[in-house]
Amino acid sequence: MSKVVRMGFLKVVLVVVVIVAFDMPDVLGSLRSSHSPRSMGPKSDPASRSPALSPLGLWNPLQVASQFQSPLSPDSKSLVQEPFGLQEKQLLEGPVKPLDWRYPIVPEVQRELAVDFQLREPVTPSSVTVQCGENRVLVEVQQDFFSNGQLIQPTGLSLGGCPVVGQDPGSRVLIFEYELQDCNGVLMMNEDELVYTFSLTYTPEAFAGTPITRANGAIVGVQCHYQRLQNVSSDALRPTWVPYASTEAGGEVLLFFLKIMMDDWSYQRPSYSYFLGGVINIEASVKQYNHVPLRVFVDSCVATQVPDVNSLPRYSFIENHGCFVDAKTTASSSRFMPRSQVDKIQFQLEAFMFQEGNSPSIYITCTLKATLASAPSDAQHKSCSFANRWLAADGSDQVCGCCDSTCGPDGEFAAPYGGIQWEGKASLGPVMVQGQKEGSQ
């Protein structure tokens, strides 16, 4: 029996280890009563045996557990309900500062205000004069054919297939002089007049080394009217024009934008329609949420007829890390504006069309870079325009010295840049470039 009791004692120890919430004095008391000499005497009646023993004389842990489930004392209840003690409970239940950090969320960009905008059509220029003689016609054409400052080339102009026969360099005038029966002239007669009609045709040529043109192709009707059975006389008519049909986020929650702006740069322009030679005002900017002040640069820009930046034809008008080459290549007035804000850079681009294209739409895609506003401009971070010489929008003209060669780590004028920079792409379009309306001469 002593062996059985010892085995039961081991089982009781195991139960006490598992059930830690029991009252230790009650456990010890139960053990004493179960191991007293009286319990060791022989008993023939199973009912008189210790309650912890089974009919076979083995220690029953389930019965012991039921005996231990007596009402707990206040102290033991507090141990069960408050295992960490009063001080720890006060620390856990004390005031906790709410978390105020959240993952950066890009706020919604405020919508631009509605702008009262109306597309103004250019005034028809008076660049063609006609003198009709008895048997000859004299036509003089200003080289500034569209009154936009762009001089046309004599090779692009013809009178019914006849080329230019003379040129006045001083007044920049191209001259045609031919017989009335030449140059595919058409004679029409009515009751009162004889009318000779010619077509003065201008076909724009692409700028050397580029696929673009800024001149509007046109056909000008030229007529000479003669009174029947009277002296020859004529008056020139005004010409008519028949045109040819031709939005990345950087790291650390940085967003790059391209916008077309009004003439005074105050609002975004609601219309993307332009006439050839018109000025497109473009603003590049960077949004710097939760960031130190940044300075934005236009690293490169490409124009295409479709959104795919790799499609053909394509025209690169800003390249070499911020050199606005369009003005030098095409003698346009395209340029960067003087910088007024570090996180914005504004530039003007003269509207053009692709000579061999079949669509009037243009898409513009630019690579933009941002540096710390405190970092100076250098050969790889600049905004340079050409006006007889290279000029920087930030006033540091010396950084533009590489625009006629190669700017960058491999260039002769490269300056090492050890600062931090962010890069992204932005695009806009389609920009619709239109010609002028038809008239008569």
Image: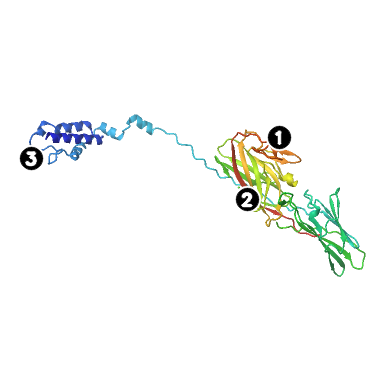
Residue that mark 1 sits on: 398
Furthest residue to the right? 231
What residue sits 14% from the left and 32% below the top?
35
Q: Amino acid at mark 2?
A: Asn
Which numbered circle lies on residue 310?
Answer: 2
Alpha-carbon neighbours of circle 1 within 10 Å: few (<14), some, or many (≥20)? some
Which comes before the other along the chain, label 3 or label 1?
A: 3
What's under tag 1, amino acid-wise? Gln
Q: Position of residue 110 (x, y in %)?
A: 59, 45
In three-dimensional space, the C-alpha distance between marks 1 and 2, rounded to whole angstroms, equals 32 Å
Cα distance between the residues tagged 3 and 1: 115 Å
Q: Position of residue 401 (x, y in %)?
A: 71, 37
Disc 2 crowd rating (10 Å Cα; few below 14, some 14-19, many 20+) is few
Residue 45: which disc?
3
Residue 77's place in the image compared with 195, above or below, is above
Q: Residue at x 21, y 34 (%)?
A: 13
Is 35 drawn above or below residue 120 in the view shown? above
Secondary element type, mark 1:
helix
The residue nearer to you, when weighing 332 against 416, is: 416
SS of the residue under disc 3: loop
Quarter occupied by the C terminus: bottom right
For this view, does 306 lie left or right of residue 29? right
Q: Nearest the camera: 302 or 67?
A: 302
Inspect the image, locate mark 3, and give the three-letter code of the amino acid beneath it: Asp
